[in-house]
Image (cartoon, helix red, strand yellow):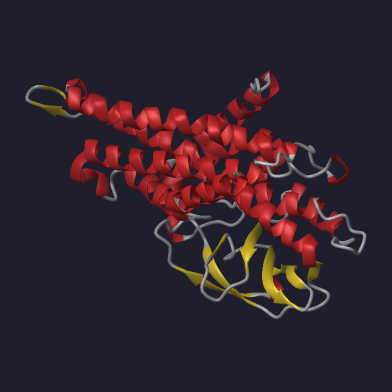
Amino acid sequence: MYFAFTEQQIEFRDAVRQVLAKECTTNDLRAAFDAPPARSPRWATLSDMGVIGLSVPEANGGLGLGLVDLVLLLEEAGRVALPEPLMETAALAVPLLAGLDGSGSGGDPRQASWLEAIASGKVAAAVGPASSSVPLAGADGADLLMLSTTGGDDGPEIHVLSSDQVTVTPLASLDPTRRLGIPTWEPTPESRIASGSTAERSILLTADRAEVATAAELLGLTERMITMAAEYAKERHQFGKPIGGFQAVKHLLAGAQVKLEFARPLVYAAAWSLDQGEDGASRAASAAKAYASDAATTAAQVSLQVHGAIGYTWECDLHLFLKRAWALGEAWGSADEHRQRVLASLLHKR
């Protein structure tokens, strides 16, 4: 298979990178520690650019594009540790809603209005299992919550609720810019949009998409941390010379870069596989998440080692990205869990 991004996809990525570099600085991230925004002026800007509604069908005001188109933009979101729930809204909620046909067998005619509201930037969403023990990213401050259950009379169910139908208990996070919360709510026939086999397929596909989307953000975080470490290695001096001139430091940075270069094509390939509905798409998603988590973990260790103790301090920007990398490394399954999934899938295939 030959794969390459189009010129338009690259141009779109570069435009988003320029906007986020200006509108999501490290000062903005520090401000978000105290008051993480669900929707902010950045959210409106991304909506105007078409980023939020990228996967929304054209009939509902979006661009009608796929995960391959979105994955580069999620990478840019990771590069700046974007506080807003772009992944939860654009990569998870939109495809889930758009994938339900509204015929009554697994969809809901209200999906059009929800999709239009997302495309216009009026709605930020949270997606995940309804559990009293599993925190939901983006739940605190979400306008729309899409919650899955496993124990309905007809099997698994998916419910959609507005923020006024759910009580969200905020939870402290390793990365305070990720708005975690535990939703408390009562499922009703009106809130249910899918059940049975339709819901089960949607839940599994959403998990695969979440793994790839999270992996894409980890790519951006990994590159940012390596860049920060390399720049600091040029400035920090020991024995009268920059530490970046020492072979040991060069090897550390090169090793982290190698892990990033191995992870990146796996993430892109997994996005393509999911868009194409390939039989091995779920396995590809797990492989992508495992490699991206490993790359981010290595980059975090190396960048912190290069910075030394100052890397832990509030004054140093590095900690803003370390916390996000550590949080996303475990989100939607750790590297070890996904390696086990890949192994089980290969053994089953045999």
Any part of residue 124 in sight: no
In-front residue for pair 267/250? 267
Q: Is residue 31 left or right of residue 93?
A: left
Q: Is residue 226 left or right of residue 147?
A: left
Q: Is residue 134 left or right of residue 282?
A: left
What residue is drawn where x is 65% and y is 28%?
12
User: In this rendering, is residue 336 above or below 155?
Assistant: above
User: In this rendering, is residue 194 above or below 291?
Assistant: below
The quadrant in which the C terminus is found is: top right
Residue 269 percent location from the top left of the image = 61, 32
Residue 227 percent location from the top left of the image = 36, 30
What residue is drawn where x is 69% and y is 52%?
205
What residue is drawn where x is 42% and y is 47%?
325
Question: Quarter-wise, where is residue 249 in the image?
Answer: top left
Outermost residue toward the right?
Answer: 103
In-front residue for pair 303/18? 303
Question: Quarter-wise, where is residue 299 in the image?
Answer: top left
User: In this rendering, is residue 252 above or below 309?
Assistant: above
Outermost residue toward the front?
Answer: 350
Any part of residue 270 in sight: yes
User: In this rendering, is residue 209 above or below 125?
Assistant: above
The quadrant in which the N terminus is found is: top right
Residue 51 percent location from the top left of the image = 68, 39
Residue 158 percent location from the top left of the image = 74, 66
